[in-house]
Amino acid sequence: MSDTIRSRSVVLDCPDPRALARFYGEILDWRIAYADDEWVVLNGGGAQMQICFQKIDDFRPPTWPEGAVPQQFHLDFTVDEFDATEKRVLAAGATKAEFQPGDDYRVFLDPVGHPFCLCI
């Protein structure tokens, strides 16, 4: 018996799991490993992690950085440089957050409003 804990997945609530999985698949160059109407699993090449997307009928996007619906969590992605990567995530459907609290990361919102950061 072992008390080891390993990461398995991060699950994002959303109104359309396939659409949000396509967005993250595009920006991360990951593939959809499983999909049905309620649940989609996105896997990276050699990554031990997966991102899952769960359908929520009355989904309300976070009102980051503050407001009635707190962010509760966000995803951080390491990048080599900002400008080219920013163009890529914007072209995929992200929105750059109006409020940018730091210089070594940039905050974006995915197509349904979840915050995520590109970090140097």
Image (tube, rainbow, N blue to C red):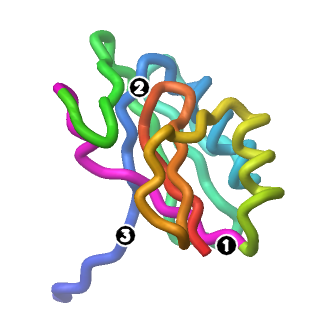
Kind of residue at disc 2: Cys
Residue at (71% x, 44% y) in the render: 89
| Gap between marks 1 and 3 measured at Cα | 14 Å
**Label 3 CA crowd tier, 10 Å (few <14, some 14–19, many 20+):** few
Circle 1 Cα neighbour tier, 10 Å, few/some/many (<14 / 14–19 / ≥20): few
Q: In the figure, is residue 104 to the left or right of 73?
A: right
Q: Residue at x 44, y 45 (%)?
A: 99
**Horizontal and vertical percent for residue 120?**
61, 75
Tell me the SS state at disc 1. Answer: loop
Q: Gap between marks 3 and 2, in whole Å?
A: 21 Å
Q: Earlier in the sequence, mark 2 or mark 1?
A: 2
Residue under label 2, please give it.
Answer: 14
Position in image of residue 67 (x %, y %) = 21, 30
Query: Which secondary structure, mark 2?
Result: strand
Relative placement, left or right, of 94 versus 73 is right
Q: In the rendered view, would you say 102 is above or below 84?
A: below
